[in-house]
Image (cartoon, grey):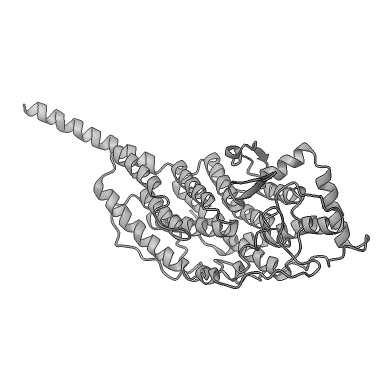
């Protein structure tokens, strides 16, 4: 009998140990974190958030997860408290050896990601599925409780900080005034939507000193009557390019389209189709790079946080320029002065042309990613497969940003000089973020 009891105890102990290893292997898998980012990306897409608003969700959520990891891996990563504007302190409960930092990071990411912009509960079912699986794999109740306490504490601090970034105040701000002035932006077909987020330049940056820190030169003066003017030549350059796109150029344009809500019009039938927005596209790239590099969970969370911050600040800078110059879109110019039936290859977004948002934020993200994974990091970008667009290969993140530069031109959305300028300005934003943030400690 004694031997039987001893044997039973040994079996139970073995099962307990195996369960412990199982839930840890599940929760600490970096691909689960990337899957969670994808889930937030899907929720953001479903809510029709424009790209700059989406970047806000990604950034605050990623920072919350990072701050949890900075507690659990303090020998490797530094807290962003004090480093980011307005983030003075982060509340943390007393140290608890029962905490599973992977679980706490996931819970903090989900809590902040869904609370920053849309009502809490949007990711509840997804969170429940993670907890259910972890419990099946042996997650002890006391570990879950301790992890949730840390996650809730960090998330509460990040949410309080987010509420002071001027987002709520800009919800009731004065709308963009459409004026019949040559060269000034007006709504474009087929939706003729109002200008998106004209006050985004007033959002508090995280790293850059102000929205106007990097001011590009003014765009070429509007002059559509002089065929020798720089402006006229830019107009004809984009018209001729769109009129003679090669299959490869069409693929490049489609791959980087990232239109979160495209209005499809067929006769009298109109319906919308959705894709991940530009920052959502880069969320996918981060996960692809982290997997290829074989990064562990803390390093993966670090990559998402750093890149999300670079994206967030780049949008603020770009929107400052957009609503300073309020420049007209190529589609409007060409329809009014050259060919009323001309259409760009892609659907024109509802905000001014100069500078290019996608080019700006992509080059900023490329700098952040290069600082994490290194230059000449070759990868295959498969983020668009779920939308029926085949993958593309890149020799580096900077090469991808340059291709994106051309994509907006091939799509008929931005003049070529605007794309070039945007890429340089975005690069400046990204490099500043990289140079100022102290995140990964040196061995």
Q: In the rendering, at what x and y percent does residue 306 appear? A: 54, 56
Q: Nearer the viewer, residue 378 or 255?
A: 255
Q: Is residue 122 left or right of residue 142?
A: right
Q: Is residue 281 left or right of residue 142?
A: right
Q: Can you say whether 257 is above or below 323 in the image?
A: above
Location of residue 434 (image quadrant)? bottom right
Which residue is at a point 38% across and 43% down the rendered structure image? 27
Residue toward you, 430 or 111: 111
Residue 375 seen in the figure: no
Q: Does the image show residue 254?
A: yes
| Residue 264 placement (x, y as % from top left) | 66, 46
Q: Nearer the viewer, residue 200 or 281?
A: 200
Front residue (pair 89, 375): 89
Quadrant assignment, res 267: top right
Give the residue drawn at x 77%, y 47%.
Answer: 410
Residue drawn at point x = 46 percent, y = 58 percent: 118
């Amino acid at each position: 009998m004694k031997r039987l009891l001893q044997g039973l105890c040994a079996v139970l102990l073995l099962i307990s140990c195996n369960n412990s290893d199982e839930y840890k292997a599940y929760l600490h898998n970096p691909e689960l974190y990337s899957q969670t980012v994808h889930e937030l990306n899907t929720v953001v897409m479903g809510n029709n958030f424009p790209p700059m608003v989406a970047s806000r969700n990604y950034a605050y959520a990623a920072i919350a997860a990072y701050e949890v990891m900075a507690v659990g891996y303090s020998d490797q990563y530094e807290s962003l408290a004090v480093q980011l504007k307005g983030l003075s302190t982060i509340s943390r409960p007393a140290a608890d050896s029962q905490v599973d930092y992977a679980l706490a990071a996931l819970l903090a990411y989900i809590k902040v990601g869904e609370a920053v912009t849309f009502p809490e509960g949007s990711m509840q079912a997804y969170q429940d599925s993670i907890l259910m699986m972890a419990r099946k794999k042996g997650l002890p109740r006391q570990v879950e409780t301790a992890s949730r306490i840390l996650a809730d504490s960090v998330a509460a601090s990040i949410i309080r900080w987010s509420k002071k970034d001027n987002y709520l105040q800009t919800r009731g701000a004065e709308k963009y005034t459409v004026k019949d002035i040559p060269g000034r932006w007006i709504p474009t077909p087929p939706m003729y939507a109002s200008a998106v987020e004209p006050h985004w330049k007033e959002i508090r940056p995280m790293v850059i000193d102000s929205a106007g820190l990097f001011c590009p030169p003014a765009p070429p003066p509007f002059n559509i009557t002089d065929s020798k003017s720089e402006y006229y030549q830019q107009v004809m350059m984009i018209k001729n390019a769109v009129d003679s796109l090669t299959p490869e150029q069409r693929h490049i344009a489609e791959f980087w389209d990232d239109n979160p809500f495209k209005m499809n019009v067929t006769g009298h039938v109109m319906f919308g189709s959705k894709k991940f927005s530009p920052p959502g596209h880069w969320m996918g790239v981060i996960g692809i790079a982290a997997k290829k590099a074989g990064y562990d969970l803390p390093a993966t969370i670090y990559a998402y946080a750093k890149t999300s911050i670079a994206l967030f600040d780049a949008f603020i800078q770009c929107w400052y320029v957009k609503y300073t110059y309020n420049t007209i879109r190529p589609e409007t110019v060409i329809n009014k002065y050259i060919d009323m039936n001309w259409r760009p290859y892609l659907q024109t977004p509802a905000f001014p042309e100069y500078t290019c948002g996608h080019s700006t934020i992509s080059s900023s993200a490329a700098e952040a990613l290069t600082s994490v994974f290194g230059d000449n990091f070759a990868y295959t970008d498969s983020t668009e497969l779920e939308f029926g667009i085949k993958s593309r290969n890149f020799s580096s993140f900077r090469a991808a940003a340059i291709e994106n530069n051309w994509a907006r031109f091939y799509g008929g959305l931005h003049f070529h000089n605007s794309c070039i300028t945007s890429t340089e300005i975005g690069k400046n934003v990204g490099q500043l973020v990289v140079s100022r943030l102290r995140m990964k400690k040196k061995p």
